[in-house]
Amino acid sequence: MSEKVERFKQLKAEALKGGGEARIEKQHAKGKLTARERIHFLLDEGSFQEIGRLVTHRSTLFGLDKQVFYGDGVVTGYGTINGRLVYIFSQDFTVLGGSLAEAHAEKITKVMDLAVKNGAPVIGLNDSGGARIQEGVVSLGGYADIFYRNVLSSGVVPQISVIMGPCAGGAVYSPALTDFILMVENTSYMFVTGPNVVKTVTHEEVSSEDLGGASAHSTKSGVAHLTAANEVEAFEKIKKLISYMPQNCEEDPNRFPYEAGDEKRPVLNGIVPENPNAPYDIKEVIREVLDRNDFYEIHKDFAENIVVGFGRLAGRSIGIVANQPAVLAGVLDINSSNKAARFVRFCDAFNIPLLVFEDVPGFLPGTDQEWNAIITNGAKLLYAFSEATVPRVTVITRKAYGGAYDVMNSKHIGADMNFAWPSAEIAVMGAKGAAEIIFKREITSAENPTEMHAQKEKEYADMFANPFRAAARGYIDEIIMPEETREKLIVAFEMLENKVDNLPKKKHGNIPL
Ligand code: HXC
């Protein structure tokens, strides 16, 4: 017996060493923590329970028979974050470069299966050289086993990927299938084909960082939803992110303590400028309406003409989607439609009510947008809102023009409560353009066309550049003063708390992709 205990202790110590001192030092020198240190920082102290510590690879090819590492390059298990259960896998770059092979993949799929059966989020800490080259096709099979589970788990439990080192080739597709990707600045990269292949094929010279670093993916491609300056900051951001979510699709998000007080916010009265074409920052509105210091922005530096993120209103989690008049006048384009549609679908899948702030002059014109399919991409946002059955509330702060009025959570596509500020302009288009079209003859034949244009523009603006006609139709439930917005929203979301709404029976819809 004591011999077996000794052996067990020896194996455990061996497993905890990962790839050994020298490789751990190399890892630290790059500004990266080890797989186990990362788990230590992310989970509640002492909560981690490891699964499969003694798993080893089975291949004996290309010298693998002489290189046996317990755990096979990934630490897996479960624990808690602020007391809530999460499943976790953390790739160990010090063991065969964190490369993924048969046993490594089996360990990951085991925790993914447990997560779905027990209804808790999965967090993947990615730091890997990709498919284990010595193991060949079984590595590819292992990846596919993970991809398959990513898809089946989608919408069942939240899945979060943290990229903390290399993530290249087909390996990128597991994070891509998860709900959120956070990349650590300067030490992580993601690409399907690396700089060498790029150079051979397109003759472009580009570094790994420029091609697929945190900056490229958080500003240009939108692949990364969040970035962090270092690994410790990454963990803080992940902890906060999951605080807004429920454990699974059957549950509601946790409600945070909140004490009712005076909810009037007079500062909101002064945010929308007198000049209807002057920009303002919608984030000022969002921050003022939400519980203090509670706005958690997603995709902050990508498609900044729309703002999305989580927040709390009287302690309740909500998802916010807002046009941003400070960037491109808040116009909808391909990237902003994709960004918002994906966010809306996440919120809907996980019972997070949606709050929309609308100030949109329409869709962005141009060959670039048309040829890259603004038609299909804009339709994604329309589809996502129309399909969402969570409580949905819209506040029109200023412009609600054209098709964009319909798209941005209008009453007609199922929004529950639609408010407008007195500054709202709900119309087919802006008064200037409208007058040009419908009064073309009067303007061109007038003695003073400029004067006539101005007069007709005013006529149109008086008629439509306001919220009153929409309110008369019931498309707007109530016109409210900006300062009342927070209290109105608190009460509206409370009223909608037990909303039940079901889509027609179907296998699944066919969102325009
Ligand atoms: C086996 C690997 C490995 C891999 C790295 N290692 N990648 N072992 N399979 N894929 C090992 C190295 O041999 C080395 O072992 C240790 O990990 C650290 O690697 P280094 O090269 O010393 O580290 P570094 O200089 O930081 O470079 C990291 C790297 C590089 C850029 C990731 O290792 C690299 O280019 N690896 C190969 C990447 C690759 O081509 N992967 C397959 C892609 S195809 P020792 O013993 O010295 O510590 C793919 C398909 C997936 O992934 C398809 C899914 C559908």
Image (tube, rainbow, N blue to C red):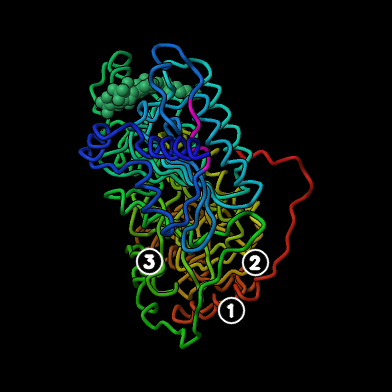
Above or below, 400 against 305 in this view is below
Residue 235, image x, y percentages: 37, 53
> Exactly how many numbered labels are in the figure?
3
- Which residue was labeled with disc 3? 276
Crowd rating for badge 1 (residues with CA inside 10 Å; few <14, some 14–19, many 20+): few
Q: Which residue is drawn at 43% across and 21% down?
A: 132
Nearest the camera: 434 or 209? Answer: 209
Specify start and end residues of the magenta stretch as a single range.
51-56
Q: What residue type is labelled 3?
A: Pro
Would residue 80 be counted in the magenta stretch? no
Disc 1/disc 3 C-alpha distance (Å): 29 Å
Residue 302, image x, y percentages: 37, 47
Looking at the image, is mark 2 or mark 1 earlier in the sequence?
2
Direction from residue 384 to residue 481 in the image, left or right: left
Residue 462, image x, y percentages: 48, 71
- The single residue placed furthest to the top in the displayed view is 62
Q: Residue at x 53, y 60 (%)?
A: 84
Instruction: Classify the position of the C terminus by image quarter.
Output: top right
Magenta span: predominant SS is loop
Which disc number belongs to residue 416? Answer: 2
- Which residue was labeled with disc 1? 491
Q: Residue at x 31, y 37 (%)?
A: 188
Nearest the camera: 138 or 354? Answer: 138
Mark toward the viewer: 1 or 3: 1
Mark toward the viewer: 2 or 3: 2
Mark toward the viewer: 2 or 1: 1
